[in-house]
Amino acid sequence: MTIEILYPEVANLYGDLMNMEYLRRSCPEIELVNTALGEEPRFLREPVDLVYMGSVTEEGLTLAAESLMPRRDEIAARVDAGQRFLVTGNALDLFGLDITADNGWSLRGLALFPTHARYTMMSRYNALYVGKYGDIDIVGFKSQFGHSYADGDVTPLFDTLRGCGLNEGVMGEGLRRENFMATYVTGPLLILNPPFAKELLADMGVSEPSLAFEDAAMDLYRQRVAQFSDPGTGIVYH
Amino acid sequence: MSKLRFAFAFLAAKLSVAALKITGHMGTNLPGKLALKLCPDFLRYIRKPERIIAVTGTNGKTTVSNLLCDLLERDGKPVLSNRYGSNIASGIATTLIGGCDLLGREKYGIAVLEIDERSAPRIFPWVRPELAVVTNLFRDSIMRNAHPAYIADILTRNLPAETRLVLNADDLISCGVAPENPRVYFGIERMDSDVTDCVNLVNDIRICPQCHSELRYEYRRYHHIGRAVCDGCGFASPAYDVAGADVDFGAMTMRIRDAEGEAEYRLLSDSIFNVYNMVSAAAVLRQLGYDHARIAEIMDGCAIVATRHNEEKVGDVTLIMQMAKEKNALACSRAFDYVAGREGTKELVLMMNCLGDVKHWSENVSWLYDCDFEFLDRPDIRCIVATGARALDYRLRLLLAGVPEEKIICIEDELEAVTYLPFTPGDQVYLFYGTDSLVFAQKVRARLAELAKEAAK
């Protein structure tokens, strides 16, 4: 079982890479393979069970876009054919139409989704997040320069219960297209959400998945779900 | 109109200083806050010392600022500083208000100002330092500072063009700040303990800043700190203008040298990050015209500020307060690495909780997964108390780091949790705390001392 990590040399912020290390620890048959900037993504030439990309610097977004843009149509075809992706943090913005920042920086995205990201570089959005993935409670954090705004209909990954979705005006969080899943929620997402991590492993074909230190992770998850769901707990950090 | 507004703001701020003095509320930013509220461009008009040295960067800026103040004062120069105030715009305003007499005339010829990196856009348009030290740029608070390249960009956009930069050549991120500015590089030459591969989770400069090929490190100290070269395009870390060399932690000495001379310096601390702090301070003084012999002489009597690391024998154990800033993966990793590398058996208490977040929010814990808890998986660490609001987070992170479950004591109440420590005779008992838990840490320390004494009976 192979997980391909895209561009860990730049997409390595906010502990996000530990998401994949957690899956590997939970399932020893998983092999993590790194794809560097400029290399052809492995999933375009051989079967890969999950493609992952995590939070990334703005320069890293530019470099990742340069690497992926020549293969944009092929990537879109693979996504429509069911290639499984998990994208966390601001890496989500790479797959929309564009990113524009108030300091003049901008980037054209891969246009897998009709979304525009808008960054305000001196004003970060910091918040807690509570949502649902089917019946599964999702908790985590958002720490980002901006939000995404969709031109048309998009399918969200999570239904927001507390906090904001793709932007402060919508409740749908993240983006979904077939098995492509992207979310702004960090944490790391899979460590903070063991039921979601198990669901992902099951979707990847792991039978009866169990997680590393599952009891400790579940104790923490239950505590966090209760705390974040409490109306007395603030959501947006001021 | 602006000057009239400034005069009013200055007077009001001076009155507030007097009122605070009378009521015993010193060390607050209130005068500067008030001044900036009444006159948003207050920093533009207030008189400033002729020479300003700014110190910024992720880690070490307080230590370097304090060290520079101590050095200059030991040389007989009165120094204006924000040593007891904050490093954001209101703190700088408060400091500058204190540096003027009632008529608004500056009383000091030189200022050493610690400046928060993110506050650069509010400070540097009007406070234009002759020299600015950037100690290093690492990951800091995710919520505020995002990532170091973002902070480097803020500094590049805001540092005055004429400011001479004193930069860490061993840190390719801060090296890249304001590339058009005049600059001097400091660093530490190869050490026996150096490695070439990164052993840390965080390595923020893996690719060449010019051609984006993978960088190769000729030597590396920790994270991205070291000397890197690019085999793709020939790019390399800059050469040192002022270099620390022959660092000897046994003899507690090193040499600092440059093209014009060198001297032996007594080490003020046995930690490598404080060696960097010493070399950066020496580099600043060299720019001010001091020779090495004089710098070494006045530095010999200095001390590194005690709030960061403080140890005391209590009962049969050594009780050690170890600052490890909350929400700062790098500061905690450095502290863990330092403690892990010390001789002897240890008992640890982890309470780097962000107490401010506990009341109405919840701390963003993603930094725990950037932090090298793996350093704590050692046979000479007897047990680890995970405590405070994030006790369960610490427990899971420690387990993932390989620490055996039986070594972990996980109890949320800090004062109760420490009662489970064994206080084995001869052990070092470390209390890891952050800036946010500074006051509460003293309470826990007092409890630890009581328990250590009881255990010794």
Image: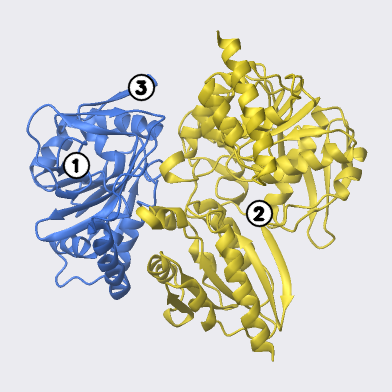
Chain colours: A blue, B yellow
Could you tell me if residue B169 is visible in this image? Answer: no
Q: What's under tag 3, amino acid-wise?
A: Asp
Quadrant in which the C terminus of chain B is drawn: bottom right
Q: How crowded is mark 1: few (under 14 residues within 10 Å), some or many (20 or more)?
A: many
Question: Which labelled disc corresponds to residue B194?
Answer: 2
Q: What's under tag 2, amino acid-wise?
A: Asp
Q: Is mark 2 on a helix, strand or loop?
A: loop
Location of residue B173 (image quadrant) = top right
- Residue B422: x and y in percent read 58, 85
Q: Mark 3 points at which residue?
A: A102
Q: Is mark 1 on a helix, strand or loop?
A: loop
Disc 2 sits on a residue from what chain? Answer: B
Cβ atoms under marks 1 and 3 closer than 8 Å: no
Q: Nearer the viewer, residue A112 or B410?
A: B410
Query: In 3D space, how far apart are the residues under numbered discs 2 and 3 (Cα atoms)?
Result: 41 Å
Residue mark closest to the camera, 2 vs 3:
3
Q: What's under tag 1, amino acid-wise?
A: Gly
Drawn side of residue B325 relative to residue A177, left or right: right
Disc 1 sits on a residue from what chain? Answer: A
Q: Mark 1 points at which residue?
A: A165
Q: How crowded is mark 3: few (under 14 residues within 10 Å), some or many (20 or more)?
A: few
Could you tell me if residue B422 is visible in this image? Answer: yes
Location of residue B282 (image quadrant) = top right
Query: In 3D space, how far apart are the residues under numbered discs 1 and 3 (Cα atoms)?
Result: 21 Å
Disc 3 sits on a residue from what chain? Answer: A
Among all residues in the image, which is located at the extreme bottom?
B457
Drawn side of residue B43 relative to residue B368, left or right: right
